[in-house]
Amino acid sequence: MGSADYYIPAVVLALVFLTKLPALTRRWHNPMVRGVAGLTFLIGAGFFFAAPPTIRYVNRATGVHNVSAPLVYALLSGCSTLAMVLLTYWRSGFGDSVRRQVRGWLCGGALVIVAIAVLFASGDAPSERVRDMDTYYASAPGVREMIVLYLLWHTAVHATLTRMCLRWLGEAEGWLRAGLVCLVTGFGLGTGFGVAKAVALGARWSGADLDYLSSDVAPPAAGIGSLLCAAGFLLPQGERLDALLGTLRRYRELGPLWRALRGVAHEPDLTLTLRRPSLEDRLAYRETDVHDQLIALAPYCDPAVMTRGHEEALRAGMEPERARCAGAAAMIAAAVTEKGAGRERDDGDREAGFEAVSRLLGGGGDTIARVARHYGVLSRRTVTTGSARPAVPAEKVAR
């Protein structure tokens, strides 16, 4: 692996970490947010400090031969431990028994890191080795035990994680399943990294030479595996992105109907009084306001307009559900015009309007959103044609 193979992933992961900082600040109390951000940082740091130029620089800056080795081992051991903690929280929640289990893993990882430092300090590695540290010092007292301890912890944790993800994979779907596929592959490669290193060490102890497994095969496996693990923990957040995009889409779809209803209601926008309202808060307010304003508009609604709009939409080739929403949109558009003109209807007609609006609201938020979508198309067609009479959109436009 060349220097770019280390530094490019490090830079990418650093950028990902920076994008996580706002969420980390707002939701520091959430262990998953802290864990994902921490794992991204540690993997990126592992790539950076494992790069040969960085190894040489750290060794020379500290004046300690091969001190980069325990530093990289400690970072990678921290990655393994944090991955186990994240998966435990992800799979089992945040109960008391889970917290005890997590504390056990954290304590185990901390002990391994401390032992790595102590064993390195107790050994002697006078010759700088950038690529073959493990096999070159395979028989050096202290350093040998440090290498074995690191590989045991790394391989055991990754093998356990691979098994856990495989068991969970059959139950998952969507973004979660995609994340688990990445994790299974990444942890599997991490396990292969440990096995390749162990085989190379065993060969050294038996007098054979399989150093290429340690210096040429294992590093790419670890690098690709680490990136896949980071992706595996990030991908399930795509569900949150989907939800956010869905919220934004519904908020925008309700816009034309909401503005039209508020235009005839002549009321102020109360969202302006909220302090930094979230998109979810804005959507909830807009949905509530549309609901209330439709009730206020009910006396001006004419079910006959809705029926005609429904029939025209069916003749245009719309599906029945879309046609009903198109007819409702036409009724609302006509009612907005009637209310804006100040034209009153008799009591019987008002009662029919209330019944029509009640049935419409009974369909729930999804129905109102579909009606609002058709209303937006009606508004654009009215502006384009210059006609005051709302027209039912053609099938091509509505779909």
Image (cartoon, helix red, strand yellow):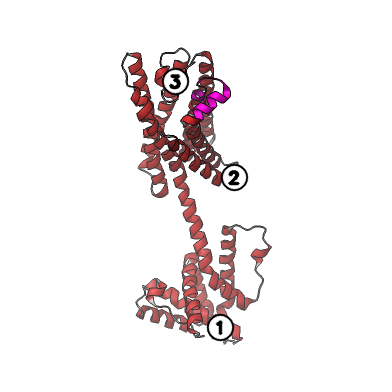
Please determine whether, in this image, residue 274 is positioned above or below residue 360: above
Labelled pair 2, 1 in contact (Cβ < 8 Å): no
Furthest-left residue in view? 208
Residue 145 visible in the picture: yes
Mark 1: few, some, or many residues within 10 Å (few <14, many ≥20)? some
Judge depth for marks 1 and 3 and give the one in front.
Answer: 3
Q: Is residue 356 above or below residue 130?
A: below
Q: Amino acid at mark 2?
A: Arg
Estimate the x, y position of residue 307 in percent, counting from the top left. 43, 81
In the drawing, does residue 264 fall left or right of residue 207?
Answer: right
Q: Residue 147 shows which numbered tag?
A: 3
Residue 361: image location, x then y, percent: 51, 70
Residue at x-position 34% and y-position 25%: 212
User: Does the CB distance between marks 2 and 3 fall below 8 Å?
Assistant: no
Residue drawn at x 54%, y 77% as measured from the top left: 354
Magenta range is 54-71
Tell me if I can see residue 300 in this picture. no
Query: Where does the N terminus fall, quadrant-wise?
Result: top left
Main SS, magenta residues:
helix
Q: Earlier in the sequence, mark 2 or mark 1?
A: 2
* Nearest to viewer (mark 2 / mark 3): 3
In the rendered image, which residue does mark 2 sit on?
27
Task: State the separation of the CA atoms marked 1 and 3.
Answer: 80 Å
Q: Amino acid at mark 1?
A: Thr
Separation of residues labelled 2 and 3 (CA atoms): 37 Å
Q: Nearer the viewer, residue 262 or 386?
A: 386
Q: Residues within 10 Å of mark 3 (few under 14, many from 20)?
A: many
Depth order, front residue of 72/287: 72
Residue 337's tag is: 1
